Image (spheres, rainbow, N blue to C red):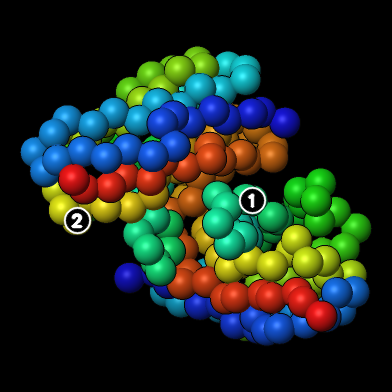
């Protein structure tokens, strides 16, 4: 199975800060990576797919980058509504695997 | 708006069985790939199983292989997850989800239900 290493596990930042979450994979997955946001008590929501393509309706402050084994999700200006846990997921091959999650807190 | 709605979660004893259902609306399961993803308390997301509505292919995580069975009923636009020999570690919120983006081998999920809670405890 492809292992996913996501960091940090917890992140505390102020409104307006630029925030970056990284995801490393144990083998190359080309661009087959998605990012999800899960708010407390809610279902996950896809933000980014194919490493850098923004899902329709997702605010433009979210962006994704990377290829191969190193990926990043950036929030250009953190907003109170961004309080959530973020997950990366590879879909290069079965089984699809998720990162351990990054909990984003607002200072 | 495309939706999926799960049902069937409950409290069950270890070794017991449960069947989860997922009904789709505003899209056809017969042309879709549907998966189940779970989140155990205090843990992250874990893929469980996937079924292709196109050719019926099924896939399972090692942790549930041989105990869980995924199936589809295209006439009712419904996917089921039959869970047997349940263990305490199967306790989780189970989400039904649609594979919306694919690498040609595997997919990412674009439509998610609200989840159904499965608790395995004596």
From the viewer's perspective, is A48 left or right of B8?
A: left
Q: Which mark is residue B93?
A: none
Is A80 drawn above or below residue A26 in the view shown? below
Q: Which residue is disc 2 drawn over?
A: A81
* Viewer-closest of A79 and B22: A79
Q: Within 10 angstroms of label 2, few (less than 14), some, or many (20 or more) residues?
A: few
Residue in view at x 52 percent, y 71 percent: B115
Location of residue B92 with respect to B122 vertically, above or below: above
Q: Which residue is mark 1?
A: B47
Classify mark 2: helix, strand or loop: helix
Q: Residue at x 82, y 80 (%)?
A: B122
- The answer to which quarter of the image holds residue A66 is top left
- In this rendering, the label closer to the viewer, 2 or 1: 2
Depth order, front residue of B67/B39: B39
Residue B70 as seen in the image, left or right of residue A82: right
Position in image of residue B77 (x %, y %): 59, 77
Q: Residue B14: horizontal and vertical position, in percent?
A: 85, 74
- Residue drawn at (35%, 59%) of the image: A39
The spot of residue A45 in percent (x, y) is 38, 55
Q: Is residue B87 left or right of residue B28?
A: right
Count all numbered tags in the image, as a single digit: 2
Question: Does mark 1 fall on the same chain as mark 2?
Answer: no
Q: Nearer the viewer, residue B11 or B115?
A: B11
Q: Is residue B102 visible?
A: no
Query: Which quarter of the image is occupied by the N terminus of chain B?
Result: bottom left
């Amino acid at each position: 199975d492809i292992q996913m290493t996501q960091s940090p596990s917890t992140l505390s930042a102020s409104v307006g800060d630029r925030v970056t979450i990284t995801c490393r994979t144990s083998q190359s997955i080309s661009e087959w990576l998605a990012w999800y946001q899960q708010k407390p008590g809610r279902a996950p929501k896809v933000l980014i797919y194919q490493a850098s393509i923004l899902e329709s309706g997702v605010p433009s402050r979210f962006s994704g980058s990377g290829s191969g084994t190193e990926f990043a999700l950036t929030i250009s200006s953190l907003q109170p509504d961004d309080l959530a846990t973020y997950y990366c997921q590879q879909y290069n091959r079965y089984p699809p695997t998720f990162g351990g999650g990054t909990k984003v807190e607002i200072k | 708006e495309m939706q999926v709605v799960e049902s069937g979660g409950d409290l069950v004893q270890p070794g017991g069985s449960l069947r989860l259902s997922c009904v789709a609306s505003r899209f056809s399961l017969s042309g879709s790939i549907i998966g189940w993803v779970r989140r155990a308390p205090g843990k992250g997301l874990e893929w469980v199983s996937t079924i292709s509505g196109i050719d019926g292919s099924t896939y399972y995580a090692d942790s549930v292989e041989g105990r869980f069975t995924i199936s589809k009923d295209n006439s009712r636009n419904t996917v089921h997850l039959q869970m047997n020999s349940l263990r305490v570690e199967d306790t989780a919120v189970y989400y039904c989800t649609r594979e919306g983006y694919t690498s040609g081998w595997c997919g990412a999920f674009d439509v998610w239900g609200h989840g159904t809670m499965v608790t395995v405890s004596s």
